[in-house]
Image (cartoon, grey):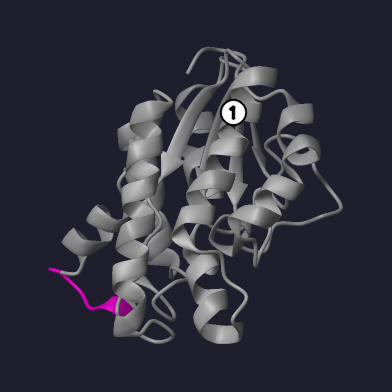
């Protein structure tokens, strides 16, 4: 990550995490939300005060891959970031089991590829970071989610390889963390992280990307 870079975090509610909508300035306390993007941003800005990094969060709660693609031009391409971090996929499963409005794994991959192709076309020099969608078997998450989420993780890993993106292993990080504390310590409902879970994500992201 070079000096002067603009870093964009994109995704669903895990990334959004209560970010303000009235202030979209880079590095703004409210606009970064309360989760892992803010924690990662704080560490980067503290350790690199002279590098003029600009960090943005444009996560939107409830987004599936199709929702993210629909707003990709305005919320990613037009911002011209130098590094784009994407975490998307859990709602594509959750919305199917909850309201039969999910996105099948094959279609998830197709639309994700469309999003990445558009990014490569419009922002050929942007570095891509693809984050592993994760769940813990607890709360809202039932056993029937697990195979489908594993398939989505395989998609993201494959896309990261194919598009020469950095792959952030969030599921692996949580699986390891479960050896020291239960799923209710790391997440509120098997999907949304607690403060400790977000800190784990920020550390994993920084250790992988930086």
Q: Hey, which quadrant is residue 6 in on the image?
A: top right
The x, y position of residue 178, in whole percent, is 19, 69
From the viewer's perspective, tell me whether residue 179 is left or right of residue 203.
left
Front residue of 117/167: it is: 117
Based on the picture, tell me whether residue 78 belongs to the magenta stretch: no
Based on the picture, tell me whether residue 181 belongs to the magenta stretch: yes
The x, y position of residue 78, in whole percent, is 79, 28
Front residue of 120/13: it is: 120
From the viewer's perspective, tell me whether residue 176 is left or right of residue 160.
left
Residue visible at 60% across and 37% down in the picture: 114
In the picture, which quadrant includes the C terminus? Answer: top left
| Vertical side of 123 occupied by 118: above or below | below
Residue 53 seen by the camera: no
Residue visible at 65% across and 67% down in the picture: 62
* The furthest residue to the right: 22
From the viewer's perspective, tell me whether residue 18 is left or right of residue 45.
right
For the record, the magenta segment spans 179-184
The x, y position of residue 97, in whole percent, is 50, 82
SS for callout 1: helix
Residue visible at 23% across and 78% down in the picture: 182
Residue 90 seen by the camera: yes
Residue visible at 62% across and 14% down in the picture: 4
Majority SS type along the magenta span: loop
Count numbered badges in the picture.
1
The x, y position of residue 50, in whole percent, is 56, 15
**Within 10 angstroms of label 1, few (less than 14), some, or many (20 or more) residues?**
some
Residue that numbered label 1 is attached to: 117
């Amino acid at each position: 990550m070079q000096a002067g870079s603009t870093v964009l975090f994109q995704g669903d509610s895990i990334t959004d995490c209560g970010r303000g909508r009235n202030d979209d300035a880079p590095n703004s306390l409210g606009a970064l939300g309360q989760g892992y993007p803010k924690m990662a941003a704080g560490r980067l800005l503290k350790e690199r005060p002279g590098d003029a990094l600009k960090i943005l969060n444009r996560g939107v709660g409830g987004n599936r891959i199709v929702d993210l693609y629909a707003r990709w031009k305005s919320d990613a391409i037009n911002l011209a970031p130098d590094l784009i971090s994407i975490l998307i996929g859990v709602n594509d499963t959750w919305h199917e089991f909850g309201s039969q409005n999910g996105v099948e794994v094959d279609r998830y991959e197709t639309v994700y590829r469309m999003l990445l192709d558009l990014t490569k076309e419009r922002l050929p020099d942007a570095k891509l970071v693809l984050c592993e969608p994760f769940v813990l078997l607890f709360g809202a998450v039932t056993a029937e989610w697990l195979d489908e989420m594993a398939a989505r993780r395989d998609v993201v890993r494959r896309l990261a390889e194919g598009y020469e993106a950095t792959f952030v292993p969030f599921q692996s990080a949580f699986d390891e963390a479960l050896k020291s504390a239960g799923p209710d310590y790391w997440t509120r409902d098997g999907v949304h992280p607690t403060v400790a879970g977000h800190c784990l994500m920020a550390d994993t992201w920084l250790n992988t990307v930086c």
